[in-house]
Image (cartoon, rainbow, N blue to C red):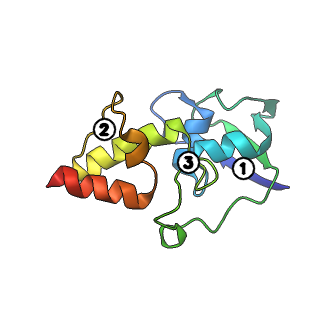
C-alpha cells in the first residue's frame, strides 16, 4: 500500500479533489485516481474524489498499488492506446488533453466529431491529426 500526503495551496477558490491532485502531483491522472484509490481523507475525514478542497486542506490518499513512478514522456509508447488498457486515460482526461493541445498547437476538436476516437487513439494519431490540422 502506498500513501501520499498533499497540502492544498495556491487555489483561488474551491476545486474538486481529483482535479487538484491530478494537476498538482506527478503521475496521477484522474482515471488512475478513480481506479486505484483505497482510501481518501481530507482533514482526517473520509472524502470522495468529487469533494471540494480549499487552501490549507490536508489530503491523504492510500493507493492499492505503488504509485507509478515510471510514467514520463520518454517511456510512453507513441503507438499504444491512450485509453483503457493503454495509458488508462478517461473522457475527462480527453477533454483536458484537447484543451492543452488547443493552447499549445492551436488545433480544435469538435465534441460532435465522429473522428475524435480515431484522433485520440494514440500519441501517433494525435500527432498526425495536429500535423494535418496545421497544414
Report the mark closest to the observer, 1 or 2.
2
65 is higher (above) or lower (below) than 96: below
Q: On the rendered structure, is 64 left or right of 73?
A: right
Which quadrant would residue 71 be assigned to in this image? bottom right
Residue at mark 1: 5
Report the mark closest to the observer, 3 or 1.
3
Q: On the rendered structure, is 117 left or right of 107?
A: right
The residue lying toward the viewer, choosing from 81 and 97, is 81
Residue at mark 3: 83
Residue at mark 2: 109
Which quadrant would residue 113 be assigned to in this image? top left
* Secondary element at tag 3: loop
Q: How far apart, in angstroms, are the residues tagged by discs 3 and 1? A: 27 Å
74 is higher (above) or lower (below) than 109: below
Decide: few, some or many residues near mark 1? Use Cα within 10 Å; few <14, some 14-19, many ≥20: few
115 is higher (above) or lower (below) than 53: below
User: Which residue is at 39% across, 61% downward?
Assistant: 124
Q: Quadrant of the N terminus?
A: bottom right
User: Which residue is at 72% across, 29% downward?
Assistant: 48
Amino acid at each position: 500500500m502506498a500513501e501520499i500526503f498533499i497540502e492544498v495551496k495556491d487555489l483561488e477558490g474551491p476545486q474538486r479533489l481529483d482535479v487538484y491532485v491530478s494537476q498538482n502531483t506527478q503521475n496521477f491522472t484522474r482515471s488512475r485516481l478513480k481506479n486505484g484509490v483505497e482510501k481518501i481523507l481530507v482533514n482526517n475525514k473520509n472524502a470522495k474524489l468529487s469533494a471540494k478542497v480549499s487552501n490549507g486542506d490536508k489530503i491523504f490518499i492510500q493507493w492499492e498499488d505503488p504509485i507509478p513512478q515510471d510514467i514520463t514522456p520518454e517511456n510512453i509508447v507513441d503507438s499504444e492506446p491512450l485509453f483503457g488498457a493503454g495509458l488508462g486515460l478517461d473522457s475527462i482526461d480527453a477533454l483536458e488533453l484537447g484543451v492543452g493541445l488547443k493552447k499549445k498547437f492551436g488545433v480544435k476538436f469538435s465534441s460532435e466529431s465522429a473522428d475524435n476516437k480515431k484522433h485520440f487513439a494514440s500519441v501517433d494519431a494525435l500527432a498526425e491529426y495536429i500535423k494535418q490540422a496545421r497544414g
